[in-house]
Amino acid sequence: MSSPLDTGQTTDRPHLTDQSHADARAVEALLFTRPSAPRIDHHLLGGQAVYDLDRQAGNTLVRAVPGIRDMVRARRAFVTRCARRFAEEGLDQFLDLGCGLPTGHDVHHVVHAVDPAARVLYVDHDPIVLQHAWAHLSGPGVEVVTADVRDTRLLLAALHDEGMLDLRRPVAVLLAGVLDFVADHELPAVLTGLRKSLAPGSRLALTHLCADRLTTAEATALTEVHARTQTPLRPRGRTAIGALFTGFVLDEPGLVELYPWGPDEGVWPVANSFVLGGLATLRHPA
Ligand SMILES: C[S@@+](CC[C@H](N)C(=O)[O-])C[C@H]1O[C@@H](n2cnc3c(N)ncnc32)[C@H](O)[C@@H]1O
């Protein structure tokens, strides 16, 4: 099977300077004439690795969706808190799917503080995210992989074949703010792939924007701003988000607003929490 992976370690890694000039111009036009979801997110977190288009798009959201900065920060805090919890539970293989731009406080920082020997794989499909990830997410046991999460069965099989993951043992999967960009008809391949490929006892941390908690104006602003990117946003209702955990057993307190997840890294005072999250364990087959 040809591998769908690119770890940035090989000479054939995609890089703008490796393209023909025409291709490079086409890629640049695509990358820099539109805002991008991860860069908007990064701007909302206070990051600098963004362009004016991303800042403008992010600022439109700040005006239209009160609390959006808090929500993005709460989601980041949720990711690192879950990663640390899973490491403390003894898991030593981490898969951060749709990892986003590095923040300086990333999954391997918290995981390696608990278990320096743990393996952390960062996966994303956005070329700018990957350039930054290759530059800033490194170290023993850390890999950055170019891949699309929309076929997790193929992705996990390739990671296993490359020796990056051992699918015979539980894996901690982080899927925060990613399925919001996956269309309904593509979701089954993501979730069935995880269920069928992972060992029972694998852990999942998942967040998703909740349409039920947005006003019509907020939902419109979010979808309109992301319609300008290459990755339209798809807020879902609570029932649809809950269904993403099929085959997994949710930890108490279930699918909740992000802020109840432990005060240890700071609780953001979120007045209107429109992102839901949950931790879960892949159950043993009946
Ligand atoms: C909103 S950011 C979330 C980043 C990080 N997980 C967090 O919670 O802070 C969503 C990320 O998912 C990535 N993404 C979206 N769709 C993807 C796909 N089909 N395959 C791989 N990555 C994807 C985007 O490029 C972006 O970096």
Image (cartoon, helix red, strand yellow):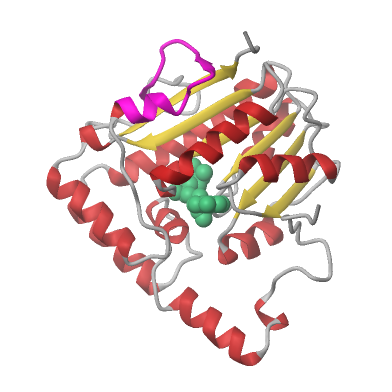
* Quadrant into which the C terminus falls: top right
Q: Quadrant of residue 46?
A: bottom left
Residue sitting at 59 percent across and 91 percent down? 22
| Figure check: 215 above or below 64 | above
Q: Quadrant of residue 117?
A: top right
Q: Residue furthest bottom?
A: 21
Q: How many marks?
A: 0
Q: Quadrant of residue 153?
A: top right
Residue sitting at 53 percent across and 84 percent down? 26
Residue sitting at 48 percent across and 63 percent down? 48
| Residue 167: percent from left, percent from top | 77, 30
Residue 142 on the magenta span: no
Residue 244 on the magenta span: yes
| Residue 249: percent from left, percent from top | 52, 14
Residue 236 vs residue 286: left or right? left
Residue 85 vs residue 268: left or right? right
Residue sitting at 63 percent across and 61 percent down? 130
Residue 178 visible in the picture: no
| Residue 40: percent from left, percent from top | 39, 59
| Figure check: 159 above or below 32 | above
Residue 85 visible in the picture: yes
Residue 182 vs residue 192: left or right? left
Region in magenta: 239-258
| Residue 217: percent from left, percent from top | 13, 49
The residue lying toward the viewer, choosing from 215 and 192, is: 192
The residue lying toward the viewer, choosing from 159 and 261, is: 159
| Figure check: 184 above or below 16 | above
Residue 206 vs residue 94: left or right? left
